[in-house]
Amino acid sequence: MEHYVLLRVLGEGTFGRVYLARDTRSSALAALKKVRVKRAEDGLPKVLMREIQALEKLSAEASGASKHVVQLREHFAQGSAVVLALEYMQADLQQVLSSLALVGHRLPLPTVRVVLRQLLSGVAGVHAQSVLHRDLKPSNLLFSPEGVLKIGDFGLARVHEAQAQNPNYSHEVATRWYRSPELLFGARAYGQGVDVWACGAIFAELLNGAPLFAGHNDIDQLYRVLSLRGTPTATNWPSHASLPDYGKIAFPHMEPRPLRELVHPETPQAAVELLDSMLALDPARRISAAEALRHPFFQEQEKEAEAGKPKPRSLHASEEELLMELAALPALVKQWEQEQQQSISSTPPHASSDAAALPLDRRSADGGASSSSTAAAAASSGTSASASEQLRRLHLHELDWTSSRPSAFQAALQQLPPHVSLTGLKKPATVDDICPC
């Protein structure tokens, strides 16, 4: 610890704290994850051991996964705690999505394609080393200052032995909204499909600007998954009946919803087809991360360029430039909030302040400064462009469609089953009894 100067606290959880620090040996920034060890005589917690082992294995250059995995620089003991020195990451995907939602925007498709490609590249590299992450979600996908998406938090990771005869893994892994149906049914033997399902749920969230399966509890989560993907049958998932918790809960039969109705209307068909293969109910039919990288969805950009279609600004930038913009978004939106607050507080009482609160692309010249006038004013005063102007330059897509989603979309996300039968209950329970939502 003597080689690090603590700058500030980045986060805190049940495990301990994460600090931003500077390495005095190289002046490089680092994230120090300080994990408390309650009983040293019992040894290191299993979760911590797995994280260290997975990161050491994946951080090695020879692994092929190192580019898209947060690097573990070193680890050491400090009193009754263990400290992991990790490379510093500027922001995570959850912060980016939350910031975009705050200003009423979502990511443009070319940026979604870049984020998904880098995510799948990282997952494919992790899987190639026989490691399952088991907790992929936006807050565990981080952006480096150099514009690279990296996978972090390997606390639930474990080595996966594909040829193991009777694996007995825990089904209590993965954050609920990104948990695959086999995990929701209590599977103890599973494979890389649990990570691919999580990637599919993240993909849908990138396209829509909101989670696709936002369950309130495990039962509600399972219902939401089945209401969109359909009831398991001998045809669409031959082995479903052998899962430990299958049969403990019974929902009414539900037909699968067309994914075309569940994603943004402008989503190309290739993206819908890729999403469908990532969210297959049967893990044996789910596409692998390596196969997904070869999907036509990732070739559409090149085809459009060859056809001479006009390129959006995001196609003129490199992948690194696009992701550097994303990494800077949370701080930029925070600055935008401050500017809006200052604008409202400085507005005379008799004047309307509605313009300051309008979505970025809707503010007109008479309701707020235009892009050109804002830039000109910034240039003439010698100051940098305002946060509003910088956000406009990113050409983000508005979320207008969320207020007028197709009725099928509304029904799929909001419809509740008439009843749920639970094994062991004397009478059928209503959904309100189990998951008021």
Image (cartoon, rainbow, N blue to C red):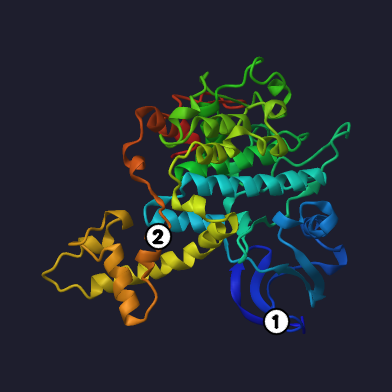
**Where residue 385 appears, x then y in whole percent?**
37, 71
Query: Which kind of residue does numbered mark 1 sit on?
Result: Ser
Seen at 74% across and 38% down, the residue is 192
Q: Residue at x 66, y 81 (%)?
A: 6
Q: Which residue is mark 2?
A: 393
Residue 416 visible in image: no
In the rendered image, the residue lying farthest to the top is 235
- For label 2, the crowd category at 10 Å Cα-Cα, with few meaning under 14, some 14 to 19 and many 20 or more, is few
Q: How many marks?
A: 2
Relative side of 190 to 385, left or right: right
Residue 362 place in picture, x, y as percent: 27, 54
Looking at the picture, how far across and down is residue 187, in whole percent?
A: 72, 33
Pointer 2 or 1: first along the chain: 1
Quadrant into which the N terminus falls? bottom right
Mark 1 Cα within 10 Å, few/some/many (few <14, many 20+)?
A: few
The residue under the point 72% across, 67% down is 86
Residue of label 1: 27
Q: Nearer the viewer, residue 105 or 407?
A: 105
- The amino acid on which the numbered mark 2 sits, given as a three-letter code, is Arg
**Quick one: 297 or 255, which is closer to the camera?**
297
Asked which quadrant contains residue 8, the reply is bottom right
Q: Secondary structure at mark 2?
A: helix
Q: Within the image, what quadrant is residue 292 found in?
A: top right
Kind of element beneath mark 1: loop
